[in-house]
Every structure is written in C-alpha cells, then in structure tokens.
Amino acid sequence: MTSSLSGVHYKGFTVQNLLAYVHERFGEETARLAVESLSAELRPHTDPRTTLAVGWVPVEAYFGIVQHVVDQHFEGKAAGAQTIGYEVTLRDIHSIFKMVLRFTTPNMVLGMARRMWRSYCDQGELLHSDENGMGVLTLRQFSYQTPVSLNELAGGFKAYLECSSAKNPRVEVIAPAADGALRWRISSG
C-alpha cells in the first residue's frame, strides 16, 4: 500500500457486489471503465479470482468505482451516490434477511448498526443516538471521508431502514461532530 491510501478496508464481497450492480444497472462498459479508472494498485482488488469475498480490500477500490459512476451517470454530483448506496444495499440484502427486517422497528435496526458495521468494515464505530427527537447515526474513527462516501453510506442506511417497518425513511448528511465523526440525521413518517 502507498501512503495515499486511508488504511480503511471493506470486505471483498462489497466490491464484487458493487461491480455486479454497476454492470446490471449501467452496463458492461461502465463497469469496465470504473475498474480502469482505479489506480494500478487498486485494480487487483476488483478481480474475484484474486480477491476473497471475506478478505479485506482498501475502501478506495469501492469508493473509486462509486466515484466513477457518479461522474458518468450523476453529473458528478455526490448526492447521486445516495442512489447507488441505496440500490446496491437493497440488491444485496437477501430475501430472508428482508423478511426478518420487516418485523423489526427502525430503532431495532439502528441499534444493530454498530455490530453490522464491523462485519463490513475494519475501521470505525457506528453509533445510534437521539438528538432533539431525531435519530442520529454517528461514525467515529473512520478516516476515509469524501462527499461521495458520505452520500453512498446514507443511501445504504436508508435501504436498511426501508426494509424494516420505517415509513418513508430519510437519511440526511449533517455536519460532522466536533471530533470529526461523521453524522447522518434519520427521520421517517
């Protein structure tokens, strides 16, 4: 790794699932060009022959692909990453898990967020709290912070809430905490 990488890692299956989604939604050429847009150092992490689904890969591989799709299909607007995060997450939540989520409340899903986060990412702590009657998700100690990553995560959180009993969930990126922790406001109804 070079010093330009954040040191944050996602499980390998996240990159493979993202590429499958990009291929299905935007076409083979977009998926190929997204991989080609990555640095030579990151490209090997996109190959299912050399990357284990349960192995760790730099998040720059994942978010580099998201950035390419945002640039090509969402006019470079970071908010487009919310669509990607939402659709990738909905696609990847298995039908059995979706059935189980239907019997949960949004607070139950948010309460499980901490444990679920660590099964996907090797860095950071995802916490849920209430502030002024609104739910807030806070991601502490996560060093990879870009407008695209913040919005992609927001879309994924929305998908999980939607699969629970939340009605019309909304996830809004809000100002970081004083310690630099990332934050999202959660509302529904």
Image (tube, helix red, strand yellow):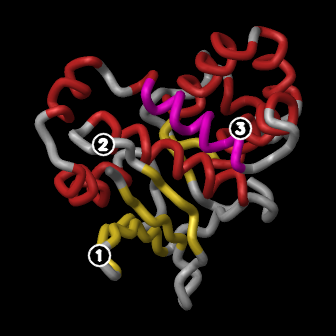
Q: Position of residue 126 (x, y in %)?
A: 38, 64
Residue beneath the point at 24% across and 51% down: 106
Which residue of the protein is positioned furthest toward the front in this rendering?
A: 189
Dot label at residue 133:
1
Q: Is residue 47 above or below residue 189?
A: above
Tell me the quarter of the picture where residue 144 sits: bottom right
Residue type, numbered disc 1: Gly
Check residue 50 for magenta coloring: no
Give the residue displayed 34% in from the left and 71% down from the top: 134
Front label number (2 vs 3) = 2
Q: Are marks 1 and 3 in contact (CB under 8 Å)?
A: no
Along the polypeptide, which appears first: circle 2 or circle 1?
Answer: 1
The amino acid type of the residue labelled 2 equals Lys
Residue position for label 2: 167
Check residue 111 in the rendering and tell me which mark sits there, or answer none.
none
Q: Which residues are magenta?
A: 79-90
Going from the N terminus, do you reach mark 2 or mark 3 first? 3
Quadrant of the rendered structure where residue 45 is?
Answer: top right
Under tag 3, what secondary structure? helix
119 left or right, relative to 179: left
Comparing labels 1 and 3, the label whose residue is closer to the camera: 1
Residue at the location (27% across, 44% down)?
Answer: 166
Q: Amino acid at mark 3?
A: Val
Whether pointer 2 and pointer 1 mark residues with C-beta atoms closer than 8 Å, the reply is no
Rendered residue at 18%/24% (across/down): 99
Q: Secondary structure at mark 2?
A: loop
> Real-space Cα distance between discs 2 and 3?
27 Å
Disc 3 marks which residue? 66
Residue 185 as seen in the image, left or right of residue 109: right
From the top left corner, tell me how far across and down residue 37 is, in percent.
Answer: 88, 33
